[in-house]
Amino acid sequence: MEAAPSLSSPLGRISISHEAVAHIVGRVAAEAYGVVGMAPRNPREKLLTRDRLRQGITIGGSAEEGITIELRVVVEYGLNLAEVASTLRNRVQYEVERLTGLPIAEVDVRIQDVKRSTA
Amino acid sequence: MTDRVRVQELAHGALASLEANRQRIDDLNVYPVPDGDTGTNLTMTARSVVDELDRTTTEDRAGLVKEVTRAALMGARGNSGVILSQIIRGAAETLRANGEVDAHTVAAAFRSASDAAYRAVRQPVEGTMLSVIREMAEEGENAESDGLTKEELLIRLVRRGEEAVARTPEQPVCSRSCAGWLPRPPESRCRRRRRSARKSPSKRFTRISRPTGTARRS
């Protein structure tokens, strides 16, 4: 596993795992307006990711250079995709910075598919 | 009055009202990101509908509905704009049918607007414009709203909407945007946190210069 991003304080080091960050991102994505699902990278990831909340989310980077976040999402058909993606990006950056204190280098949002939900 | 003139008047009225309250709405904005742009986004979304309607020459209602829906979708700005475009789409679909718009149609339009807005979100957050439109739709279907004239019903719906907005600070969205998944803070603290939220939390830590791996090996 990659080194977890860490922050030091006078009392000791605090490290936050990529899984924890991915979990936060997953929660944010679940309540983001317009996002109706997450898209795993491949069938293997779909089967192997135990935590469904982390599906479709890739975390990289370090505390020094800033962490990178990639989300693969499915958006509701008939919405302004550019606006949905940019709102999601802002919200992910805001929440992760607020909850972890880690600097964010990059948030990539990939709209993998669109779906029409039935009423 | 033709349908086109009426819808132009309505859209201009909506835009004027949004412009007048833009700053107030900006100040209310705590979710999804407390960047205070909701009023501006809503105004820009409404303006794109007004611009489209000022250009149009279509007289039939179905054509107008199509243009309004499309303008709202293309002109949607920010999260609130995207939600507003869905509310407009839902309401417009019901209002497409020709004939007099009566109290029953108004109630149905609010229901359709609420349903359309909720369709695009997996975990709706209470205390946002979503819960306000939902409460307005519920009010329209309320037994007490039965038999009212269109004007009486609209007054009632607006009153219920205002009550729903007034209640939003106590709803869970506040605890989410103010304290993550911690217990909900009292309202006063909530406001204070909102103001300080723009400061980066990373300033509270001093970041180490070397990666964790190196520290362990030395």
Image (cartoon, coloured by chain):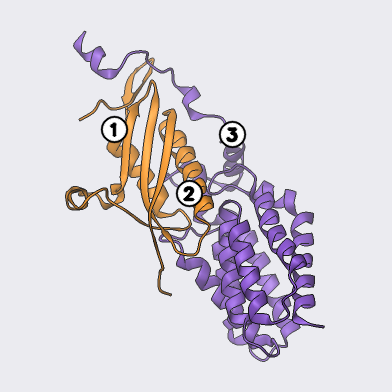
* Image quadrant assignment for residue B146: bottom right
Residues B54 and B195: in front is B54
Q: Which residue is mark 2?
A: A85
* Image quadrant assignment for residue B17: bottom right
Instruction: Indicate whether B218 appears above or below B207.
Output: above
Local packing at callout 2 (Cα closer than 10 Å; few below 14, some 14-19, many 20+) is many
At label 2, the amino acid type is Ala
Element type where label 1 sits in the image: loop
At label 3, the amino acid type is Ser
- Tell me the CA gap for discs 2 and 1: 25 Å
Q: Residue furthest top?
A: B218
Location of residue A70 in the rendering, given as x and y in whole percent from the top left corner: 36, 40
Local packing at callout 1 (Cα closer than 10 Å; few below 14, some 14-19, many 20+) is some
**Labelled pair 2, 3 in contact (Cβ < 8 Å):** no
Q: Which residue is mark 1?
A: A17
Q: Nearer the viewer, mark 2 or mark 3?
A: 2
- Tell me the CA gap for discs 3 and 1: 26 Å
Q: Which chain is orange?
A: A
Q: Which residue is mark 3?
A: B196
